[in-house]
Amino acid sequence: MSQSKRTTQSLFFHLHFSSGLPISLFFICLAAAIAAADDWPQFRGPNASGVSTETNPLPAEFSIDDKLAWSVKLGDGIGCPIVVGDRCFTTAMSGDEQFSLLAYDVATGKELWHTDLATGKLPRITPPNSHASSTPCSDGQRVYAYFSTLGLLAFDAADGKQLWKYELPKPAYLMDWGAAMSPVVHDNTVYFCQDDDLAPTLFAVDADTGKLRWQAARPDMLAGYAVPVFCTAGGRTDLVLAGSGKLKGYDPATGKEVWTCNTMPRTVMTSPVVRDDIIYVSVQSYGDETRTLKFALLEWLDTNQNGELAAAEVPKEFLARFKQSDKDGDGVIREAELDTAFQSPDNMVGGGTTIQAIRGGGSGDVTKTHVLWDIRNKSPSNLSSPVVFADQLFVVKKGGIASSFEVAAGKTSWELKRIRNAGDYYASPIAGDGKIFVTGENGFVSVLKAGPELEILARNDMGDSCIATPAISNGRIFVRTKNSLLCFADK
Amino acid sequence: MLRTALFAIACAAITSAAYAVGPTVDIVIGEKADPLEKFAAEEMAGQLKKLFDAEVRIGVMLPNGGSHLVFVGTNGSNAFIAKHAPTIPALKENEILLKSIPLEGKSALVVAGGDARAVLWAVREFGESFGIRNFNDLGDLYPSTSPEFSLNHFDFKSKSAGPTSVYFKRKVLGDTSPLGHGTWGLNEFRVYLRHLAKDTAATEVDLNVGEWKQGRPYSGPLIATTGDTAGRAAFKGEKFFDNPEFASQTSDAGRRMRAERLIDEIVAAGNEVGIVVKPFEKRVEDKVHLVSLLPRLPDWRTNVSRRVSAGRSGYGVLQVYEDLLNPICGTDVAPRVVAAAEFEWRVPALIDHYEASDVTAVRPQMLLMHFDSDEPPPAWWGEARTSYLNAMNEMYRANTRAREGGRTFTLYYARRFEFAFEYMNAIEAIRKAGIAKRKGDKDTQIAELEKAIDSVTNACNAMAAVARSPSDRGVIAVMNEYGYRPLLKLLEEADAAQ
C-alpha cells in the first residue's frame, strides 16, 4: 500500500542524515516540505471530488507561455492524467489499433515507461469521445486501466509491466456513444461500473490478483458514466453510484445494495462528489420528466421516421433485447411496445435537471428521508461534474455559464452567470488553494476565486483544445490537451 | 506458349506489402503508354490493394504464372488489347470499356478507353463497380464491407457516365477568399487535379495566383488561429491560417519565391494527369468574395438523366443516391440523405428569391453588418434556419443508420449542417443585439450578443469536428476573424458601458 502523503518525518530523515545539509538549511527545507503533497490517484482526484487539499500554492495565471514546467506530445485521447508520488500517468491511442499507458516524471516530464497494447477492431463511438477515454487509477504500487476491447488491466507502476487482465463484456450503446467509464481503487479492490444499455454491471476485482470478488447486475439502468465514490456515514463506508433514475449505495465488500435514492433523471453522465457524509450530484438529462427512452428511440433510432422500430434500425448487439420488446413477435416494436422498449419497466424515468444533496448512511429506499435539498433549474451540465469547495457547490455548463450554491441548504449564491469563456465544457472543474479551475474545450482554463461571489482571477491559454479534466499534485497542475500533456508550476 | 518466360518491367512496378494475402494481379500497359495511362494503372493497383489486399504488378509484358491479368490502355497504345481481344471494338473519345475476355482457358480483364483520359475513367468505373465512391471534398471512400474479388464478370461499354461527371473542359480556381485554393498545399492540388481527371472532362484549370505573387495565401492579412479561437482544434496548434508551403518562410521575399516554385509544381502535377494548369493574376481589392460559406450536399439530381441515358432505367433521385451511398454507408441511409438534401435545397432557393446572397458571402462585415441594421430578422431567415436544422437531423439519422457501413460521409454533412444552423442563429441574434442597443436596452443587447457568440462558437466547433481540407478550415478562420473576435469586442464594450 503506498503512502498518499509524503510525511515530514521521512523527509527529515532523508535531508538530515543522507544529504549532510546544515541544520539551518534543513529547517528551511522542512518548512517547505510541511506543505505536504497530495496524490491525484484517479479521475478527478481523491474520491473523484475534484478537490486538492494540499496547501502548496497553485498559480492563478499560467499558460503555454508562462509557468510551463514541461510538456510532452501525446496521441489521441481524452482520459485524464493522474499523479501518484513522483509519477504522472496517462493514456493515449498510439496507433490505429494500439493503446498506450504512459508514465512521466512529474518534475521533468521525462517519459519513464510506456506500455503498448493491441486493441483489435475498435467499436463504434460518437465524437468527441475517443477510444482512449477512460482515466486510469493507481494505488502507487500498480496502475489500473480500462479499455473497451480489453477490459481491466493492471500494470506495475514502477516499470509498466502488465500484471493481470480481467476481461469484461464489451459494452454496447443504443446511441453508439462508446465507453468512457473509469475504474477506481479502494481498499485493495478495483471497482468498475459498466453502465451500458445492454448489461449494466458493477464489478469488484481484487487489486493483487485481478480475480473477480463480486459483480452486481444493475438491470434497471441505462447508459451512464458516473464513477463510483465512497461515502462514510453511519459507521460504515458505502460505495455510491449515480445511475439512471437512482443513486445507490452498495456494500463495497459484497456488492449488496444497501440503499437507493430514486431521484435521478434518465441519463447520468456526471459523477457525484462526497463531502463528509453528504453526497452531492448535479445532472442534466435531455428533456423533462416525461421524456423516457421511447422518445429518444423515436427521434434517433427510428431512422426512417415511421414511428416504429425495425430490427435493422437498432444496433446488432441489441437483437435479443429487441425480440423481448417485440411482444407480439411481428418483427417491429410499435405503439405500446415502445413505451418499455430497452428501458426497465421498474425504472421508467425521464429527463430533467437536478442538483441534490443526499445524506449517506441510509438503508433501503431513502428517497423520502435522505434528500437534504433538491434544486431543479437550468444550472447543471450533462457532462461536467460539480465541485464542492469552500462551502459552495459549483457547476459550469456549455457557454461558460456557471452557478454556485451554498452546500448547507442549497441556497443560490449566484446562478447562470457567464465566466466569459464560451464554447463546450466537457472537463469538470477542480479546486485547490482557494481557487477553482474551469477548463473549456477551447483550451482556456478560467481560474475563479473560491467562495460565494463570482470573481474571475485569470483566463489561461493551454494552446490546444481540452476535453480531459486536469489534475493537481504538489503545487503542479497537469493538463491533458488534445495533443499534449502539460505541467504547470509556480516556480 | 503465349506467355513469355521472363517478365520484364519497363516502367514503374508496384508491389504491395510483403505480407499481402489477397490475389496476385498483373496489370499490363503499353510500352508507349501515355503518362495518364500509367497513372490510371497505378490508380487501379491502389484500388486492388485496398479492396482485396491484392499483390499488384504493373508491366509492359505478359507475365509468367497464374496471376490474374488486366490490360489497361487504348486500342492504339496497348498492343495486347488489340492482339488478344479482337472482338473489342474501337472506342471513340470519351468511351470506356470494361470487358472480361477469355485468354488461354482463363479470363483476363480489359480496361480501355477511347483516349488516355477515358482510360482513367474506365479505371474509376472499375472501382465504382466494387463500391468505391469519389467525392470532391472527401476523396475516395471505400465500401464498408470488402467485396468478393472477381475479374471475369465485366461486359460494360459506354460513353463515360460517372456519378459526378460534368462535361466542361475548363475549370477556374479564382476564389481569393480564405475559403479558396490559396491555402492549399501541393498535396491538396494533387488530390484536386486527380479528382478532376478521374471524374470530369476538364483539361484546363485557370489558377488565380494574384495573392500568391504577393506572398499571401488569400486577400487580406493572415488570420490568427491561436489563442482565443473558436474551433481551434481544427488548426492543430498553428499560429496562423496560412499556406503550409509558405508558412516556414520568414520573409516576404521568401514567401514569394516559394509561391513561384509552388506554381511550377502545380503545373507539373497537372501535366501528370493530362490537365493544363494556367496561372493568371486577379486580385479582389474590396475583399468581397462571391463565395458562400454555407454547405451544399452534392446535388446528384442531374445524375438521374445521365444514368438513364447510360441505360440504367427506372432511375429516380432516390435510386441515384442509393447507388452512390449504399456501398459506403450501408442500406437505408440514402433516404435520409435525400430528405436532408430536400431540406437543404430550400435555402439557396430562399436566398435567390430574396436576392440575399450577401447574407452568406464571405467578407469582413459578413456578420457585423447585421448589428448595424435596423430591420428585424426577416421571416425567411427562420425558414432557412429550420431547413438547416431539419437537414442536420436527417443527416444525424443517416449517420445513426450508417453504423454497419461507414460514417465519414454522413457525419461530415451532419456537422456542416449544424454549422449552417448555428450560423443562422448567430446572424439573428446579432441583428437583435444591434436593435436592442439602439433602443437602449442593454440587458437584451448583452443577452443577444452572448447568444451570438455561443452560436458562432458552436458553428466553428461543429465544423472543426469534421474539417478535412484547408477550405473547411478557412470557414472557421473567417468566422473567427469576421465574427467571433469582433463580437467579443462588442460584448466587452457593452459590458463596460453598463
Image (tube, coloured by chain):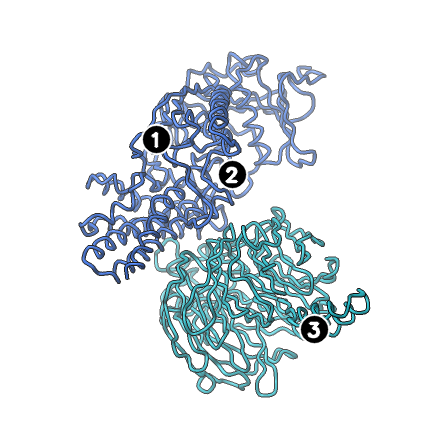
Instruction: Please tell me the numbered disc located at residue A188.
Output: 3
Please determine whether, in this image, residue A391 is positioned above or below residue B416.
below
**Labels 1, 2: front one:** 2
Residue B8 position by quadrant? top right
Alpha-carbon distance for marks 3 and 2? 48 Å
Q: CA distance from mark 1 to mark 3?
A: 70 Å
Query: Is residue A223 something one can see in this rendering?
Result: no
Quarter of the C terminus of chain B within the rendering:
bottom left
Q: Which chain is blue?
A: B
Q: Mark number for residue A313?
A: none
Residue at which label 1 appears: B308
Q: Nearer the viewer, mark 3 or mark 2?
A: 3
Position in image of residue B414 (x %, y %): 40, 48
User: Which amino acid type corresponds to the residue marked 1 in the rendered image?
Assistant: Val
Q: Position of residue A103 (x, y in %)?
A: 68, 56
**Horizontal side of residue A213 vs B198, given as left or right:** right
Q: Is residue B286 above or below residue B433?
A: above
Q: Are marks 3 and 2 in contact (CB under 8 Å)?
A: no
